[in-house]
Image (spheres, rainbow, N blue to C red):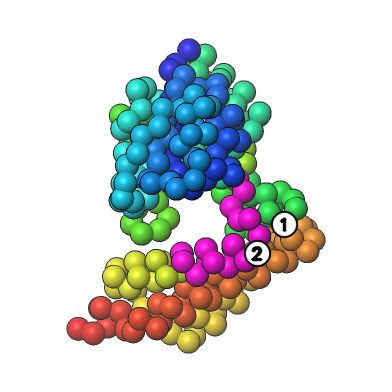
Amino acid sequence: MVPLSAVLIAQNEEKAIEQALRSVAFCDEIVLVDSGSSDRTRELAEAAGARVIVNAPWPGFVAQRDFAVRAARHDWVLALDADERVSDALRAEIEALRRSGPQAAGYRIPRVAFYLGRSIRGTDWYPDWQVRLFDRTRAGWQGDLVHESVAVRGPLERLRGELEHQPYADISDHLRKIDAYTTLWARQAHAAGRGSSVLHVSLGAAWAFFRNYVLKRGFMLGSAGLLVSVLNTHYTFVKLAKLRELGPAHSERR
């Protein structure tokens, strides 16, 4: 069996962390990097058999994820968030790979969100391909303020088993995170020289709804599909509006 380390980052995740840790109990070790929890996250993780390391203050998503990967004892790692779970089908697929020996440097995993009382297999949310199983000698985290990802140097293949995701507690939590992430996105885009206009905001939002609800079959998911499509449209509208608020792009000032 190819040895495998599960690595997680967390802060104040006592309500979710136990389920996440149970889903990776098949790994040879579990490493949890905590960024200064004030609840029982660390105690629960240690009770579940995880090796807990505190790395605070918060250095940013990419730096913290990279720290967790480097803290692992094994080169093959399975990276997880506290609000994610390895499904039974995904576990079986990973175990088969460990027995036969991975042929790729990394593997993309389809992530499915559970939200508003159902799994969301449609809209921009599905399949939300994530590279989470990889050889750290040939891969690593990259990114800026938002949308960090794993860059792989070598063959990249896909798995079929799903990574289960519970991204938001409710609509209020969803809206709070939209506000936070759109601010970060706008700052990052502006720093990169991008700009926006009223036309961009309007067309971007209209396209987002059509893409989510029609092209990506949100309409097949009932009321949940409609709400997710509207909230994804809201995300697009707000991030472009915030980018416009920051003023002309740097390239337009010269």
Q: Mark 1 points at which residue?
A: 116
- Mark 2 nearby-residue class (10 Å; few <14, some 14–19, many ≥20): some
**In this view of the protein, which residue sits in the foreground, 159 or 233?**
233
Mark 2 or mark 1: whose residue is earlier in sequence = 1
Question: Is residue 154 something one can see in this rendering?
Answer: no
**In this view of the protein, which residue sits in the foreground, 115 or 22?**
22
Q: Name the residue under label 2.
A: 171
- Mark 1 nearby-residue class (10 Å; few <14, some 14–19, many ≥20): some
- What secondary structure characterizes most of the magenta part? helix
Looking at the image, how many numbered discs can be counted on the residues?
A: 2
Q: What element carries label 1?
A: loop
Q: Does the magenta stretch include residue 166?
A: yes
- Look at the numbered discs 2 and 1 and tell me whether their residues touch, using CB distance below 8 Å: yes
In the image, what residue occupies the spot 45% across and 22% down?
A: 29
Q: What stretch is highlighted in magenta?
A: 165-181
Q: Is residue 167 magenta?
A: yes
Q: Where is residue 15 in the image (x, y as percent from the top left)?
A: 59, 44
Residue 144 in the image: above or below residue 74: below
Question: Is residue 1 something one can see in this rendering?
Answer: yes
Q: Name the quarter where the C terminus is drawn.
A: bottom left
Task: State left or right for residue 217 relative to residue 251.
Answer: right
Amino acid on which the number 2 mark rests in the picture = Ile
